Image (cartoon, rainbow, N blue to C red):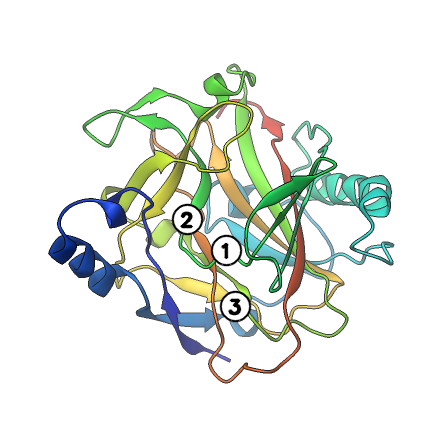
Amino acid sequence: MDFVGFLNFANPVGQNQGTDQERRAFAAQRLGRPTAIHDARASTGVMAEPVDSVARLADGVGFLLVHAPSCVSDWTDIEEVATVYYEEARALLQKLLPAAEVPATRSHTYRNEQIKEHYWDRGVQYGPCAAAVHNDYADSIGEDGATATRKFTQIQGMPTDRRVLGINIWRSVSPDPLARFPLAVCDRTSIAREDLEYNLNPNAKPRPFNAHYCKPNNAQRWNYYSAMTRDEALVFTTYDSHPADGEVFCPTLHTAVAIPGSEGLQERESVEVRFFPYLPLP
């Protein structure tokens, strides 16, 4: 089902700058903005099993949904998720990016509607549904907005002689199909680079680095997958050190979005893991 969602094109710096009138104008133009959200399940469907998807993830729209059952029984059990799911997710990504070296992950993020602030416990991040358009990893950009002065990989001490991708594997883990606050993802090929904004990621660890924010643009193509189940994984690209289409990476922007009429339905519960696989330079 397609629907109109109300997206928040927030910017943690810009929305708090200027006069009261300027801040009100920012909110009026960019917060709660009506946006068409397309059901990608109807158009692109679900990948029945993981196959080589480098073209789609690295050079294309930047997201896909794949059938990928997990053996995890309790998604709130930190030890079980770490012991079982981290390797399941790594193996899934290896099949999607067969030419890549996929280092293991050491953490995950758990979200539900009862959590109101981000916090960490035993190496796991807990947080609310992130209802603002963003992308977590961005380079430091020059004043021209088109030149990377320092790449995220350099800041984090990652290899500079290979193409480093950032990949998020996002899964609804509620008992029944997802009914509230799905993750909306934007076709990265529909994003104008001049609309991207760069500010520090407030959750950056261990060193400060930028995140992407963005101006609204009617040309952006926003998508979600209706009624996601525990057996499905939404995979999307959050970073590329050497993008094939330019010096500066254009991300798969994403945000939680409320489905009209979903009040009172099963609350969202989700788990995400992040990887930084290495590919040969293009």
Q: Residue at x 26, y 64 (%)?
A: 218
Classed neighbour count for the residue bearing mark 2: other residues with Cα under 10 Å, few (<14), some (14–19), many (≥20): many
User: Residue 58: x, y in percent?
Assistant: 51, 40
Crowd tier of the residue under label 3, counting other residues whose Cα lies within 10 Å: few below 14, some 14–19, many 20 or above: many
Q: How crowded is mark 1: few (under 14 residues within 10 Å), some or many (20 or more)?
A: some
Give the residue at x 32% y 36%.
198
Of residues 218 and 28, which is closer to you in this image? Answer: 28
Which residue does the numbered mark 1 point to in the structure image? 130
Q: Could you tell me residue 32's position as x and y percent?
A: 33, 67
Check whether the beta carbons of the residues at disc 1 and disc 2 lie within 8 A of each other. yes
Which residue type carries mark 2? Answer: His
Q: In this view, does 142 lie above or below 169?
A: above
- How far is mark 2 from mark 3, CA to CA? 20 Å
Residue 71, quarter of picture? bottom right
**How many angstroms separate mark 1 from mark 2 (CA)?**
9 Å
Residue located 23% across and 32% down the image: 145
Asked which secondary structure carries label 1, the reply is: loop
Relative side of 62 to 28, left or right: right
Give the residue number, with chain letter if any, for mark 3.
Answer: 40
Local SS, label 3: helix
Per the image, the residue denoted by label 2 is: 134
Residue type pointed to by label 3: Ala
Which label sits in the foreground, 1 or 2?
1
Label 1 sits on what residue type?
Ala
Question: From mark 1 to mark 3, how far is it between C-alphas?
Answer: 20 Å
